[in-house]
Amino acid sequence: MSSAIRQIPLDTATQHHAHDYHQIVIGLRGQAEFEIEGLGGSISALSGCIVPANHVHYYAGTGENRQLILDLPAQAPSLTGFHHELARLFDAPRFFTLDDPLKRYLDFLLHELAASPTPASASQYERLAATLLGCLHARLAGSPDPAHRRLDLKRLDRFIEDHLPSRLSVGDLAREACLSEAHFRHRFREQTGLTPWQYVRRKRLEAARRLLGESRLPLSEVAALTGFANQSALSHACRQAFGHPPSQIRRAAFPPAGQVTRARR
C-alpha cells in the first residue's frame, strides 16, 4: 500500500476500527469527535489528530463535515530513509491545531490536489505528505504527550464554577479536558485522589458555605445556585460534610441582634 490523501465526510453515527497504517486527520469543515485508545478530543476546521497504526479509534462527524485524511503505511517513503525521524510522530495518538504557516501549506496542498487533471501520482502524494509531516514533527516533537500531561485543574475549576447550578456529568468534565470519560476518570483520581463526583460535590459545598456566610439568600436559593436538588439535599450534604445544618452556618455568620448585644456586654 502506498500513501494516499483524500477528502471525505465522516459518518455522523459513531464508528470504530483499527488499521495497519498510520493516519493523519485534519478538519476542513464542520466538526468530528475522536477517541483513540482512550484519548478523546474534537476536531474542527484547521485542527486534527494523529492515529497510529493498529490503534482502535472511535469517530463520528457532526452535521456537515469534511476531513482531509492521510493514510500512511509504515514503509511509506515519507516515513523511511531520509524521512525516518518523522515516524516518531506516530509513537502515540495526539491532537493538534495548525498554526498560520501550516494553514497556508494546507491551502497549497488542497490547491495542488484540485489542480491535478487526474488523481495525483503516488510520488506526488509522498512529496506533499512528507512536507506536512516534517512541519508537524518540528512543532510537536518537543511538546509533552497528552496521555501523560497533567490535568489543568484551574481550567476545570473555572468550568465547574461557571456551571455550578447545572447538572454536571463526568462526561462534561472529560470533554473540557479533551479526554475520553474512562481516561479522564483514571487521570483525575490519580492526580487528585478523588473521583470527579467527589471533587464536584466538594466544590458545591464550598460555594454553598460561602453563600451562607456572605449573603442572606433563602436556603432554597443557595441550594439552587450551588447545584443541589433542593433545600433538603443541601441540608443533608452540610450535615455530612460539616457536622451541622446550613442554618447553623448562617447563624454563626449573622447572629441574632440579641446575641450580638449580650456578647458586647
Image (spheres, rainbow, N blue to C red):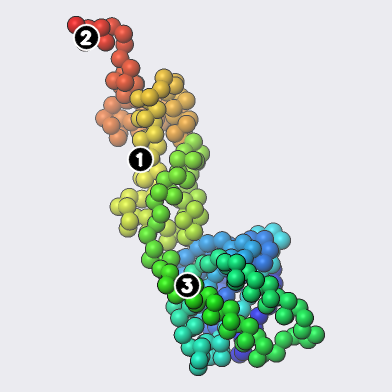
Residue most toward the left?
A: 265
- What residue do we see at 77% from left, 84% from top? 116
At label 3, counting other C-alpha atoms closer than 10 Å, the crowd grade (few under 14, some 14-19, many 20 or more) is: some
Q: Disc 1 on helix, strand or loop?
A: helix
Amino acid type of the residue that numbered disc 2 sits on in the rendered structure: Arg
Residue most toward the right?
A: 117
Locate residue 30: give its quadrant.
bottom right
Which image quarter is the C terminus in? top left
Residue under pointer 2: 264
Where residue 47 appears, as percent x and y from the top left, is 59, 65
Label 2 – label 3 distance at C-alpha: 66 Å
Q: Left or right: where does residue 28 sit relative to residue 251?
A: right
Locate residue 243: give its quadrant.
top left
Locate residue 234: give its quadrant.
top left
Q: Compared with residue 100, is residue 157 higher up or lower down, i.e. above or below?
A: above
Residue under pointer 1: 202
- What residue do we see at 48% from left, 30% from top? 224
Q: Compared with residue 41, is residue 155 higher up or lower down, i.e. above or below?
A: above
| Residue 189 in sight | yes
- What residue do we see at 38% from left, 66% from top? 148
Label 2 vs 1, first from the N-terminus: 1
Amino acid type of the residue that numbered disc 1 sits on in the rendered structure: Arg
Amino acid type of the residue that numbered disc 3 sits on in the rendered structure: Leu
Residue under pointer 3: 140
Q: Compared with residue 189, is residue 4 higher up or lower down, i.e. above or below?
A: below
- What residue do we see at 53% from left, 80% from top? 134
Where residue 170 appears, as percent x and y from the top left, is 45, 50
